[in-house]
Structures are given as structure tokens and as C-alpha cells.
Image: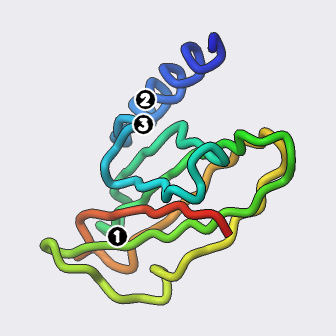
């Protein structure tokens, strides 16, 4: 698909120019549950550190269906390998129009969280 060949490098370049790191689309920290495979695809994962020292994550996903879909996205933060329990780790419902591309932005609860895992599942 020609759009993917153009869009993905452009997004990666934009992320690097903006000063944030860009993870490969096959990033092992992003898990698309079997129920959501074929429904949603991950186009981009970017992460950065803000002035407070907390990490931020940007996740760009696309609805691969020609009908509206709802998925759940849960971001779990970790500090020194230990999961941080927080209401922010609860799955968030994301409604997507047919073939819609959207970017989700998440901020770590505090500066101690140095890594993350994102799980996407079908609602």
C-alpha cells in the first residue's frame, strides 16, 4: 500500500524532528489483542519526556473496517519493572469511524514511571 510507505516514514521523521523518540510499529510494548486484530492497526508509537520529568506516549491507530468500531485502550505504566496501579491503567473506550485514523496521548502519573505497555482490545 503506497500510503503506508509514505505515511509511516513521514510520521517517524516528524516525531524525530519534534524531539521525541519513535518506536517501531511492531513495538513489543503495544499489544493488539486477538479480538482487535484486523479491526485496528497501530501506525505509530512515539514517546517523550515533559518538563516535569514524566513520560508521554502518543499512539496512532487506524480502524481497518468500513464500519464504525469501538476498541478499548489500556496504558499501564511501570517503575523499575514494577507495574504502577492507577485508575489511569483502566481501559479507555475509543470510538472510531470507518477507516478513521486517530492519535491518543497519555501522560505517566509521575516522573518515576519509566516504561509502559499498551493493550488494545475489542470492546
Residue 60 locus on image (x, y percent): 58, 45
* 106 to the left or right of 70: left
Residue assigned mark 3: 25
In what element is the residue under mark 1? loop
Residue ranking furthest to the left: 80
In what element is the residue under mark 3? loop
How far is disc 3 from disc 2 in space, using C-alphas?
18 Å
Q: Earlier in the sequence, mark 3 or mark 1?
A: 3
* 90 to the left or right of 1: left
Res 2 label: none
Residue assigned mark 1: 52
Q: Residues within 10 Å of mark 3 (few under 14, many from 20)?
A: some
> Going 86% across and 47% down the picture, which residue do you hit?
67
Q: Residues within 10 Å of mark 1 (few under 14, many from 20)?
A: few
Residue 15 lies in what quarter of the image?
Answer: top left
Q: Earlier in the sequence, mark 3 or mark 2?
A: 2
State whether residue 82 is above or below residue 122. Answer: below
> Going 59% across and 55% down the picture, which residue do you hit?
36
Residue 121 locus on image (x, y percent): 56, 63
Split into 4 quadrants, where in the image is the C terminus? Answer: bottom right
Split into 4 quadrants, where in the image is the N terminus? Answer: top right
For the residue pair 98 and 114, the one nearer the viewer reads as 98
For the residue pair 80 and 67, the one nearer the viewer reads as 67
- From the viewer's perspective, is the residue at label 3 or at label 1 nearer? 3
Residue 69 locus on image (x, y percent): 78, 56
> Going 23% across and 66% down the picture, which residue do you hit?
114
Residue assigned mark 2: 17
Q: Earlier in the sequence, mark 2 or mark 1?
A: 2
Residue 12 locus on image (x, y percent): 45, 28
- From the viewer's perspective, is the residue at label 3 or at label 2 nearer? 3
Amino acid at each position: 500500500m503506497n500510503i503506508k510507505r509514505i505515511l509511516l516514514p513521514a510520521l517517524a521523521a516528524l516525531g524525530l524532528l519534534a524531539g521525541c523518540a519513535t518506536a517501531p510499529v511492531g513495538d513489543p510494548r503495544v499489544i493488539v489483542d486477538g479480538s482487535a486484530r484486523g479491526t485496528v492497526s497501530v501506525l505509530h508509537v512515539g514517546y517523550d519526556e515533559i518538563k516535569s520529568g514524566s513520560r508521554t506516549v502518543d499512539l496512532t491507530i487506524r480502524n481497518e473496517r468500513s464500519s464504525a468500531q469501538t476498541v478499548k485502550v489500556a496504558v499501564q505504566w511501570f517503575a523499575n519493572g514494577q507495574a504502577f496501579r492507577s485508575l489511569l491503567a483502566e481501559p479507555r473506550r475509543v470510538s472510531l469511524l470507518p477507516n478513521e485514523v486517530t492519535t491518543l496521548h497519555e501522560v505517566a502519573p509521575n516522573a518515576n514511571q519509566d516504561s509502559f505497555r499498551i493493550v488494545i482490545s475489542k470492546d
